[in-house]
Image (cartoon, rainbow, N blue to C red):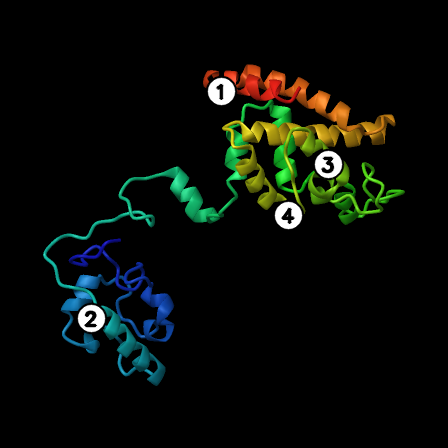
């Protein structure tokens, strides 16, 4: 509520001056003789005897002093009070109400890049799981107490646990696959790597490239586990080109020529 004359604001029950007096001053509130009194009526009262059952306790007296200081900040006005929503507008908004009730969480721009990409839905779902660390890597299965014969990465000779970042970034096989499309990656964490890849690729369809190469690395890993097919940089690149051709068909017209030229440069 936006307080002006105070006639429509309940002094004890409503939120004003960023607090509800009956909650802020519970001891003083227990001595009130009219709990439904308006703010305007309190401001026009001639003294405590009109508002409270006297005498009051020492604690209530201290709260009365604090309350009087709060009340002193209210300016007299001839204009009427008016109501607004907690987000500062007089217009209702279900989206703003939902945000207020659930809270606002800052998320990385990668989720926005993912949503705007031209990839197929299966690729988008896959990469969303990747961003949320929900892919069934050995490390995730271990965290879920699933017993496996081995939790190490299957695409490299080193006996390193197959975590999300290792499989797609730190693994020598993954790095060789990224190098096949002209991208060098280091040992940063996931979101820092995405930002570096965006700058390195320097094309508006950078997210499609990132998603598809991640998908192809994942499929190389799965083919080895479930089909016994040895991971290969050559087969990974061939798979990437096939998937990228399909994405070009779904891309915006203004990007199609540039995407074709970029793909031809890989040959």
Q: Mark 2 points at which residue?
A: 72
* Mark closest to the chain's N terminus, 2 or 1: 2
Give the residue number, with chain letter if any, for mark 3. Answer: 174
Instruction: Look at discs 2 and 1 and give the one toward the viewer.
Output: 1
Residue at 39% across, 42% down: 96
**Depth check: 249 or 103 in front?**
249
Considering only vertical position in the picture, is 58 above or below 71?
Answer: below
Front residue (pair 20, 233): 233
Front position among marks 3 and 2:
3
For mark 3, does the 10 Å Cα neighbourhood hold few (<14), some (14 to 19), or many (20 or more) residues? many
Q: Residue furthest right?
A: 149
- State how far apart marks 4 and 2 are (Cα): 56 Å
Along the polypeptide, which appears first: circle 1 or circle 4? 4
Sooner in the amino-acid sequence: mark 3 or mark 2: 2
Determine the CA span between mark 1 and mark 4. Answer: 30 Å
Which residue carries the number 4 mark?
Answer: 188
Residue furthest out toward the left: 78
């Amino acid at each position: 509520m936006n307080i002006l004359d105070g006639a429509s604001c309940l002094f004890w029950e409503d939120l004003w001056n960023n607090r509800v007096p009956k909650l802020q001053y519970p001891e003083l509130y227990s001595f009130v003789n009219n709990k439904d009194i308006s703010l305007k009526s309190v401001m026009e009262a001639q003294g405590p005897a009109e508002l409270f059952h006297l005498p009051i306790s020492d604690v209530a007296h201290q709260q009365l002093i604090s309350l009087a200081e709060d009340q002193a900040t209210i300016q007299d006005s001839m204009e009427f009070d008016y109501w607004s929503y907690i987000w500062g507008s007089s217009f209702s908004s279900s989206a703003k109400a939902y945000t207020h009730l659930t809270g606002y969480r800052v998320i990385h721009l990668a989720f926005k890049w993912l949503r705007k990409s031209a990839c197929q839905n299966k690729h988008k779902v896959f990469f969303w799981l990747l961003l949320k660390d929900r892919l069934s890597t050995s490390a995730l299965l271990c965290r879920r107490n699933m017993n496996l014969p081995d939790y190490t990465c299957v695409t490299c000779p080193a006996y390193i646990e197959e975590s999300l970042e290792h499989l797609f970034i730190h693994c020598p096989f993954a790095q060789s696959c990224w190098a096949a499309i002209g991208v060098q990656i280091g040992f940063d964490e996931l979101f820092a790597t995405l930002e570096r890849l965006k700058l390195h690729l320097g094309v508006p369809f950078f997210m499609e490239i990132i998603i598809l190469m991640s998908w192809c690395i994942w499929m190389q890993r799965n083919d080895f586990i479930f089909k016994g097919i040895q991971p290969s940089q050559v087969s990974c690149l061939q798979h990437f080109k096939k998937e990228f051709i399909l994405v070009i068909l779904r891309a915006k017209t203004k990007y199609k020529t540039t995407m074709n030229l970029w793909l031809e440069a890989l040959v």
